[in-house]
Amino acid sequence: MTDSAPKPVKYPTIHMQAGRERRVQHGHPWVYSNEVQMDAAAKAVAPGSPVRLLEASGKPLGIAAFNPHTLIAARLLSPDPAARIDEGFFADRLGRALALRQRLFDRPFYRVVHAEADGLPGLIVDRFDDVVTVQANSVFMDRHIDAVLAAIDSVLAPRALILRNDGTQRALEGLAEETRLVKGVIDGPIRLEENGVTFFANPLDGQKTGWFYDQRDNRAFIASLAKGGRAIDFYSYNGGFGVQCAVAGATSVVAVDRSALALENAARAAAANGVADRFEARRADAFQEMERLDAAGERFEVVIADPPAFVKAKKDLGAGCRAYRKMARLAARITAPGGFLLCGSCSHNVDPPTFAEQVARGLNDAGRTGRILRSAGAGPDHPVHPNLPESAYLKAIVLQLD
Ligand code: SAH
């Protein structure tokens, strides 16, 4: 060993219970608290610490992020029992995640890191060219945030770096909310591109920040059907769906949202893409506006309804499902015969078959028939860990109605 060789790290050791190792041996990245030997030493490990995870027999499983107080006690970080969890570790994972996105996309606008699937449990990193936003959704990431930020700075060299710790997942992990400009200056909305169309977003202020890159492919699909028709985009946020429909040749587009800031960004995007004359930003409640338009007999060739999560917690499943069904019913009523309807859901707690059922019931409630053309999830910059298929939260169903 030379003088410069790093000293081996002595992480605390956690043993699994005999007979409980199979899921992890088969590649699942999580260990539940009732599957480890939760002795006094394990309970004393500081939440968010790296540990050496071993089978009951003592055979190493790798290095994991440990929290003795949560249902998911350990999240595997590396199968290498000698792995060091430091800036170099984060930089290596980031580098691999970045290389994938650079292969997927020509332009530097994408989600760089999508948590577990990119080997970085709890970490979300979005890129708007040289502006980068970071979200740490686990105690482990929170504890290592300085090393994470340093790694992002070295791998992506952003002009501005924003820590956006305001997700609902943080509350579940007992973490406080915090939005902090780590580096650079943000003065006003930042510019981004998606499918060749320019948009604007406020990564720091406003009720919602950033951009939802997950709908990229679904936006391209519905936009390809919008030429020559009237389109309406409910829950438009910064105009992602609506402005792409206008650019693709819709004769008119209405973006409906209750947030003035979101509509400002949408209108600004319409202007930047030269379609302001065919674009209207309308501040309204989505359901009320759908009902008003229906009563007025207005019909649209393309109707988009991609709302915020209606089911934020499991206990809201019943009420949330009824809301999705109502949304599908009201949106279907204003879809012209032969027109297209996109219904979206980003609720983790609603699985694809359940969502599809609500949409089908809503159509039936509206007295409409049709056919599903596309049933899709998020784009490839939101990859899914093969053993965590349930982490695929996004659903988008596109139908043609008779
Ligand atoms: N479809 C968007 C994402 C939706 S985010 C996209 O493609 O990017 C949810 C949006 O719904 C937010 O902009 C929020 O302001 C808006 N919203 C929430 N409740 C609403 C309501 N009742 N009526 C209209 N807009 C609403």
Image (cartoon, helix red, strand yellow):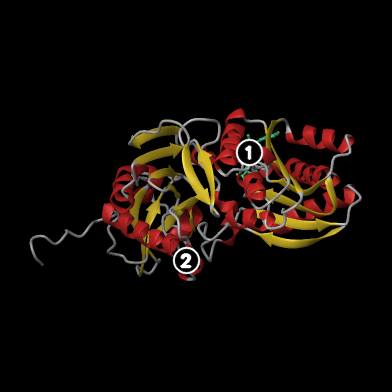
Q: How far apart are marks 1 and 2 (CA)?
A: 53 Å
Q: Which residue of the protein is positioned furthest toward the right in this rendering?
A: 367
Name the one closer to the observer, 38 or 283.
Answer: 283
Indicate the quadrant where residue 395 lies.
bottom right
Name the disc covering residue 24, or none.
Answer: 2
Q: Quadrant of ligand 1?
A: top right
Decide: few, some or many residues near mark 2? Use Cα within 10 Å; few <14, some 14-19, many ≥20: some
Q: Position of residue 84 (x, y in %)?
A: 27, 58
Q: Is residue 158 above or below residue 373?
A: above
Task: Give the residue type that dot 1 points to.
Answer: Ala
Name the one closer to the observer, 107 or 323.
Answer: 107
Residue holding disc 1: 276
Name the one closer to the observer, 221 or 313.
Answer: 221
- Which mark is nearer the camera, 1 or 2? 1
- Left or right: 282 in relation to 140: right
Decide: few, some or many residues near mark 1? Use Cα within 10 Å; few <14, some 14-19, many ≥20: many
Q: Where is residue 75 in the image (x, y as percent from the top left)?
A: 43, 56
